[in-house]
């Protein structure tokens, strides 16, 4: 049975132990660097215990862990020696805080001024976009403007033929007493109607394709004279029997 002899070094640092580990692997510094992909200057700094030349203890510990693992050493043992050496040199404060710990960021820590400005700008954009969409929907859904120029409310006619005139939007559809009327490019429209004797309601509606309906109603009166009684040449006066 073969036994591996290991020297015990009194130093609290790991330089001699790393040298022994490399030599037991039968490697020079250049060969160890080529095998582990770690630069020779880093290996030399650890073996010569020039830990002040190592700028980042956290990153260096990762390299040391990889280096020792590839050379077949006890990773926990060498990390313990490394941290103890850092503590002795005053590079770290204590064994419990041997290496910088990651800082846990809170949500409010991310809310720096540029980010707040970006969020505020996006919020304003969403509000403006929503307002524009709401305005367009309201505009499309609103009834079109409608004006009836003729006839005037309560007009009396002696002829059953009347002309209905008005104005609306050019894209609107107009119906007068459920009959379609032609709308000209300037929005004006007109239609001839025949009314019965007595009072007639003239109902005008205008509607766009996706909008509500606008409507106006005018009442007109057609007064037709009564025919003369037998033996009379003139129409009978009103109230005479």
Image (tube, rainbow, N blue to C red):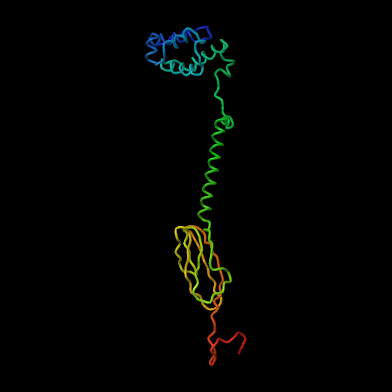
Above/below status of 223 relative to 86: below
> Which residue is nearer to you in this view: 93 or 237?
237
Query: At which x and y percent is residue 89?
Result: 56, 10
Above/below status of 120 relative to 238: above
Above/below status of 2 relative to 192: above
Above/below status of 117 relative to 178: above
Quarter that holds the N terminus: top left
- Residue pictured at 45% horizontal, 10% vertical: 18
- Residue pictured at 50% horizontal, 10% vertical: 53
Quarter that holds the C terminus: bottom right
Q: Is residue 19 left or right of residue 232?
A: left
- Figure disc tally: 0
Spot the residue most to the right. 239
Query: At which x and y percent is residue 126?
Result: 53, 42
Query: At which x and y percent is residue 115?
Result: 55, 32
- Residue pictured at 38% horizontal, 8% vertical: 28
Spot the residue most to the front. 233
> Which residue is nearer to you in this view: 219 or 139?
219
> Which residue is nearer to you in this view: 100 or 110?
110
Query: At which x and y percent is residue 227?
Result: 53, 86
């Amino acid at each position: 049975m073969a036994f591996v002899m290991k020297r015990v070094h009194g130093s609290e640092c790991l330089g001699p132990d790393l040298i022994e580990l490399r030599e037991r692997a039968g490697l020079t510094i250049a060969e160890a660097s080529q095998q582990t992909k770690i630069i020779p200057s880093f290996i030399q700094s650890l073996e010569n215990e020039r830990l002040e030349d190592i700028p980042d203890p956290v990153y260096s510990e990762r390299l040391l862990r990889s280096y020792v693992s590839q050379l077949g050493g006890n990773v926990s043992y060498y990390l313990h020696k490394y941290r103890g050496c850092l503590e002795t040199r005053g590079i770290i404060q204590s064994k419990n805080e041997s290496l910088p710990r990651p800082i846990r960021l809170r949500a409010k820590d991310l809310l720096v001024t540029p980010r707040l400005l970006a969020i505020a700008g996006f919020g304003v954009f969403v509000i403006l976009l929503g307002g524009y969409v709401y305005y367009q929907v309201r505009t499309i859904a609103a009834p079109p403007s409608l004006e009836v120029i003729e006839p005037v409310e309560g007009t009396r006619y002696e002829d059953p033929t009347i002309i209905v005139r008005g104005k609306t939007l050019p894209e609107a559809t107009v119906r007068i007493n459920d009959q379609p009327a032609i709308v000209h490019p300037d929005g004006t429209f007109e239609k001839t109607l025949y009314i019965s004797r007595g009072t007639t309601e003239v109902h005008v509606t205008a509607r766009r394709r996706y909008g509500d309906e606008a409507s106006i109603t005018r009442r007109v009166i057609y007064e037709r004279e009564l025919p003369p009684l037998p033996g009379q040449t003139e129409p009978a006066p009103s109230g005479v029997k």
